[in-house]
Amino acid sequence: MVKIGILGAGTWGTALAILLCDNGHDVTMWSKLEREAKELDESRDNIKNLPGARLPKDVKITLDLKEACTDKDLIVMAVASPYIRATAKEVAPFIKEGQIIVNVSKGLENGTLLTLAEVISQEIPQAKVAVLSGPSHAEEVSRRIPTTIVVGSHCKETAHFIQDVFMNEVFRVYTSPDMIGIELGGALKNVIALAAGVIDGLGLGDNTKAALITRGMAEISRLGVAMGGYMETFSGLSGMGDLFVTCTSRHSRNRNAGVLIGQGYPLDEVSKMVNQVIEGVNTAKAALALARKYNVEMPIVEQVNLVLFEGKSPQDAVADLLVRDKRKEYSTLDWD
């Protein structure tokens, strides 16, 4: 049995608490919000946003951050990306040397342009930080629907430890040393998923969405390789796998937000209607800044930013993507 502290009691943190408790581990889940903690503790058979899921009685829920972090073999960072640095800073005094922390949130930090694991490592330098990502909607994981995911760590032993902790007969975990590639795939796919939702909101077809997903993957992999990631990662679970599920699933808050944008709703109304953190909106500006920093062409990301923050119509964004200059599909392929 492994002692685990989960920081963040949203849908993903709760789904992982169910999974890890099922695996026989000692799980304590922390929430910063007293109302959220009370609702979870009292309504274990009726979890908000996780229909059909049940939170086991053995999962302890606490408002005490020190309790959630002290004497733990593993800490799971499951707060939304905008709150990662603040939470890590608050947690740091309670973290022992060599503590393993696995980040399961997806995004980039605006301003610094750091990945979330890099943010955690800055604030908690004494910890061993890993990442867990892949096509894994909380709604399905919480109901024990078969899922496959990847854990990334610079340390092989840390990756294998996390793999053993999470893996069971319905939750398969692979390992990888490519932390930067895994995090970029998980963060940037949310921006592309917004665009995929816009396609649906405009009433366009499967051809359009397939083109969007494929070219979106090309953008993600170009930037990822430029930043030190490996191409194999972007064809894997945290790349194409996560991109596909987030662009097509009814569970995807980013896709659902994009649908509303495509239907003409302004961003502030969309945020209220979705009523959850829309990670793609938070990541879009950082993604565009990284594209410019590394001199990587990302036209879909650019158009998403124009629609979100500059008032460009979704229809004009789609039209401008289609009339770009003619080019080869892959610059590395040519005729003899």
Image (cartoon, helix red, strand yellow):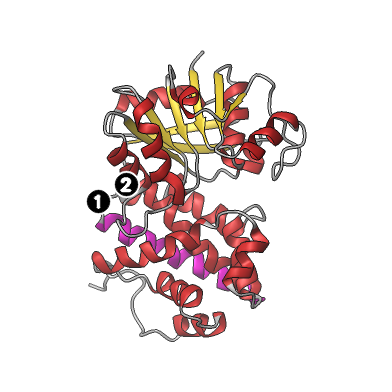
Quadrant (top left/top right/bottom left/bottom right) for the C terminus: bottom left
Which amino acid, by three-letter code, is at mark 2?
A: Ile
Give the residue at x 58% y 20%: 23
Secondary element under disc 2, as helix, strand or loop, is: helix
Q: Is residue 206 visible?
A: no
Farthest top residue in view:
1
Residue pointed to by mark 1: 228
The quadrant in which residue 248 appears is bottom right
The answer to whether residue 132 is magenta is: no
The answer to whether residue 213 is magenta is: yes
Q: Which class describes the residues within 10 Å of circle 1: few (<14), some (14-19), or many (20+)?
A: few
Q: Which class describes the residues within 10 Å of circle 2: few (<14), some (14-19), or many (20+)?
A: many
Q: Is residue 35 visible?
A: yes
Predominant SS of the magenta segment: helix
Quick one: 123 or 302, which is closer to the camera? Answer: 123
Query: How many marks overall?
Result: 2
Quick one: 127 or 195, which is closer to the camera? Answer: 127
Residue pointed to by mark 2: 180
The quadrant in which residue 155 appears is top left
Q: Position of residue 176 (x, y in %)?
A: 35, 36
Q: Position of residue 3 (x, y in %)?
A: 49, 18
Quick one: 261 or 44, which is closer to the camera? Answer: 44
Is mark 1 in CB contact (under 8 Å) with mark 2? yes
Which contiguous range is marked in magenta? 202-226
